Amino acid sequence: MAQSSTRGTGFSSTSQAATGRAYPNGNPALGYNPPGVRNTDSAVPLHRSKPVTHDYACEGPAPGSLSFRWTYGSNVAAKNRDPRVQVVQYNEDTFVLRQNVCVHWEAPFTYLLFGNEGALLIDTGATANAAHYPLRETVDAIIARWSRARGRSKVPLTVALTSGEDVAQNQGLVQFADRPGTTIVPKPLAAMQRAYGLTNWPAGTGRLDLGGRVIEVIPTPGTHRDGVTFYDPYCDFLFTGDLLFPGKINIGNDGDFVASLERLQTFASAHPVKWLLGGHVEMMFVPGKYYPRFATYKPYERVLEMTPDLIGDALRHAREVRGKDMMLIRPDFVLFNGVSPDQRTPVWPEGVPNINPPRPF
Amino acid sequence: MDRRSFLTYNAAAAAVPLTGMALTGLSRAAVAASRPAPIDFKSNLPAAGTFPDRWICGSPSCMDNTDPPVQVHWYNPHTAILRQNKAYSYEAPFAPLYFGNERVLLLDEGFVQLRNDWDLRGVVDQCIEDWCRRNGRDPASLELLVAFSHLHADHYAATNQFADRPNTRYMGLTHEEFVGFWGMTNFPEERVTLDLGGRDILIWGSPGHVVSELAYYDSYSQILYTGDMFYRGRCYITFWEPWFESMKRLIAFCDTHPVTHVMGCHVEISKDGQDYPYGLTWQPDEAPVQMTVQQLREAYAYAQTITEPGIYFTGTVFLCNQTRGTTTIDRNPYRYT
C-alpha cells in the first residue's frame, strides 16, 4: 500500500528531483490512503493470528474495479490461446469470471462472492467438460488463495444459478457435484423456491447469508420461468443473469418480463445499486449494434456493467413490445419478443446515432 | 508476352547454349519416354467415387479443435473434395478440386483470408503434388485455375493466397471478370465447356442466390456442383425469378445429362432434417453434402407451388425465399406461458 502513498501529494517529479522534496518511496508523514478515500485498506493484516473477519457494512458501494478488457475470442477460433476462464478480481471479496468465447460462444459471466462464513458462486458457465472449461479448478484455486489470505481452513461454497433451465449457465454445475462443503441450489423451479424460501413466488425475496454479506434473491422470471436476480449489498450489484444484460434479451414471457422489471425497479429505488451485472455481453461498443449468435470473435464488445437507470429504459420498452411479436433495438440492449433469436429489423431507434462498427476479417 | 510463355522462354533459352543440341535432343527423348500416357477421362463413365460417411464437422469447444484446417477427401483418384474446418469458420464450405491432364480446377475456398491463419494454398499444393506423384507428372506442368461458384467472401476469401503461385490463374471479383473468365457472352443461359485436358467441365449461369453465380458439371465424376444456389441447408434466394429460371435450367440439364450427385457448398441441416442455425460451429449429426437428382426434382416441384416470400422445407433443403440473410426458423427455446 505504501507504493500508492505518493499519489495525490502534489509531486509529479521523479526521484531524481534536485529539491529533495519528492518522496519516491512514499511520504511517511501521510496516511496510507489519500484523504477522502474509504475502504481501500486491505482487509488482510500483515501479521494475523486468527481468521480475519471483515466488516461488510460500508457507506456506499464497496470500491472495486472492472477496468480490464475481457478476452474476446479470435478470428480463427481453433487458434485461440487465451485463458479458458478469465478471472478478474473486482475487489478482495468479489471475483468476476468469464468463459472464453472460443470455448463457448455464449461466453457467460460467473461471479464469485466471499463473506465471512462462506462463498457464493453465481452461475456456472456453458460447458460441462472440465477439460474445456475448468471452472471448478479455477474456483477451487481462488477459494484456496482467499482462505489462505484470510486464515480460514474451511470456506463453504454455495452454487446458485440465475436460471436453472438456462443451458448457457447451468452446464458447469456438474463439476461441483462431488465437491465437499458445497451446497448446490437445486435446479427444478419448485425445489429452488423452497431452497430460497420463496413461498409467495414471484413476490418476496430470499436470503443467502455469506457471513456479514447477505445476498438477496429476487424472483425475476421473464426470460426464463425460473429466473432470479441476486443483490449484493456490499458492492451494490444486481446480478441479473439473462433478464437484463447488454445483449439480445430473448423474452420468454412478456407479462412476467414486465412484472419482473417493475419489481426490480422498485427494489432498486429502495436499495443502493451501483451496477447491473448480467450474464453475457453481446452488444458492441457502438449503440444498438450487436454480435450475431455463435460469434467466436467479438473484439468490439460493450462493457459488461450497466447503470441502474437502464432498468427504467428496459421497462419502458418492455411495455412497448408486450403482446407483440417483434424485436426492438435500444442503445444498450435489444429485446426479442416472440420472434426468432436471429430476427432482424430495419427499424432504428430514434435519436440514437447509427454508427457502423469496424468489421474484422 | 504473358507470364507463362515468359517462364518457358527463359528455361528454353538457358538450356540450349549450356547443353548443346545433342544433349537437348537426348533429354527431350528421355522426357518423352518417361512422360506417362494421358489419363482417359472419357470412358467408363461415370467414374466411381465415394463421399465420406461423416465429414469433420466442428467441435463443442472451438479452441480445443485439433482437426486439420482443411479436410481433404479424395472422391476418386482424380477428384478431391476439400472442406474448411468449422472451428476456422462457421461457413465451412466445400471445395472440389478436379484434376485433368493439363490443368486443375479449384472451386471455392473458405471464409478465412490469411495464409498464416489457414494454409489453403499449402493444402492445394500438397494435393497437386500427391496427384502428380501418383500419376508420374511434374506439378509445375499443371495449370491451376482458382474459380468459385459465386461472388461471396466465404467462397473467394483465400484467393490472394494463390497470387504468387506460378502457372495459376484466378477469377476476378467483379461480375464482368467472373463471366469473362469462362468466356461467356450470354450469361446465364450460355453453357461453356472447360477442358482440363481430356476432362470436360460444363459451366453455365445459375443466378438467384446472388446475381453472379455459376453451376459446374464435371463430365468425369458427373457431379453437378450447384454452389449456394441449391445446397443441403438454407438456400437463401435473393431473387426469386432468376432462381426459379436457374432451377429450370438445372432440371433441363439433368434431363439430358447423366448426373450422379448434386452437390452444394455447405451443409446446414442434420440427418433428420433439423435446421442448424446460422453461425453454428458444431454440427455433430449433419446431413451428407451430396444430394440426388430426385431430391433436386422434388425441390423444383415444391418451388413451383411457392408464391410468397417465406421459408419452405422441401424435405431436402430449406428454400428461404427473399427472407433476409441470417433468418432461420429457430425459436427461443425458453418461451413459456
Image (tube, grey):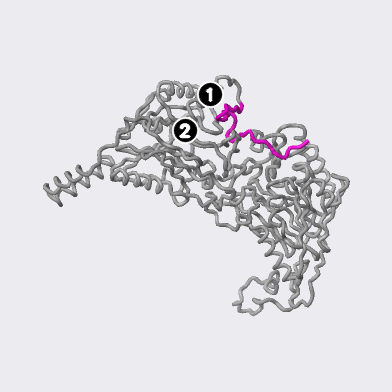
Q: Work out whether A49 lies above or below A188.
A: below
Question: Tag 2, which secondary structure?
Answer: strand
Closest to the observer, B91 or A43: B91
Question: Where on the picture, by quarter, is residue A19?
Answer: bottom right
Q: Amino acid at mark 1?
A: Glu
Q: Position of residue A174 (x, y in %)?
A: 70, 54
Q: Which residues are magenta?
A: B310-337
Name the residue located 72 percent from the left edge and 50 percent from the top edge: A278
Pointer 2 residue: B263
Label 1 chain ID: B
Report the side of A337 relative to B259 (left or right).
right
Q: Which mark is residue B81?
A: none
Which chain's residue wears label 2? B
Q: Is residue A58 visible?
A: no
- Identify the residue at image location x=84%, y=52%: A196
Quadrant for the N terminus of chain A in the image: bottom right
Q: Amino acid at mark 2?
A: Met
Query: What residue is pinned by disc 1?
Result: B298
User: Which element carries disc 1, helix, strand or loop?
Assistant: helix
Magenta stretch: dominant SS? Answer: loop
